[in-house]
């Protein structure tokens, strides 16, 4: 059982994730001209921009749970000299 303070922090984090600009795995793959599987592979190997996984609670089925904050994507692109296609 989560403590009240932990639950509050979790809810704040979820709110932040829902309000800041982000891309899903499919959107990031399209931006970089890669297949979504390549992005998932990078994520599994610990390469690529920072991402967040949102909890399933309160979201419809098939809602993408992995989110890449746009600020993290832009920083990663700049640091690695990546020019997006879109």
Image (tube, rainbow, N blue to C red):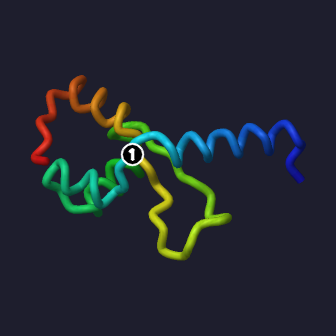
Please state which of residues 4 and 82 is positioned toward the viewer in this rendering.
4
Q: Residue at x 62, y 58 (%)?
A: 55
Q: Nearer the viewer, residue 83 or 45?
A: 83
Q: Single out the residue that lies furthest toward the top.
A: 79
Going by the picture, which residue comes out furthest to the front? 19
Q: Residues within 10 Å of mark 1 (few under 14, many from 20)?
A: many
Percent across and percent down for residue 41 are 33, 55
Most distant residue in the bottom direction: 61
Judging from the image, what secondary structure is the residue with disc 1 in? Answer: strand
Q: Quick check: 35 left or right of 55? A: left
The answer to which of 20 and 49 lies nearer the viewer is 20
Please name the residue shown 27% across and 51% down the image: 28
- Kindly indicate the quadrant of the structure image that contains residue 21: top left
Q: Is residue 16 left or right of residue 80?
A: right
Q: Quadrant of residue 51?
A: top left
Q: Residue at x 50, y 59 (%)?
A: 65
Q: Which residue is mark 1?
A: 22
Which residue occupies 19% across, 50% down?
31
Looking at the picture, does residue 47 appear above or below residue 74?
Answer: below
Where is residue 23? Give x, y as percent: 35, 50
Q: Quadrant of residue 11?
A: top right
Q: Is residue 77 above or below residue 1?
A: above
Residue 40: % across, % down: 35, 57
Please give left or right for residue 16 compared with residue 77 in the image.
right
């Amino acid at each position: 059982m989560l403590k009240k303070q932990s639950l509050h922090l979790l809810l704040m984090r979820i709110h932040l994730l829902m309000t800041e600009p982000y891309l899903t795995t499919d959107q990031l793959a399209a931006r970089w001209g890669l297949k979504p599987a390549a992005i998932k592979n990078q994520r599994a190997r610990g390469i690529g921009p920072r991402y967040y996984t949102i909890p399933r609670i309160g979201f419809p089925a098939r809602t993408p749970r992995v989110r890449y904050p746009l600020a993290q994507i832009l920083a990663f692109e700049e640091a690695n000299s990546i020019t997006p296609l879109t």
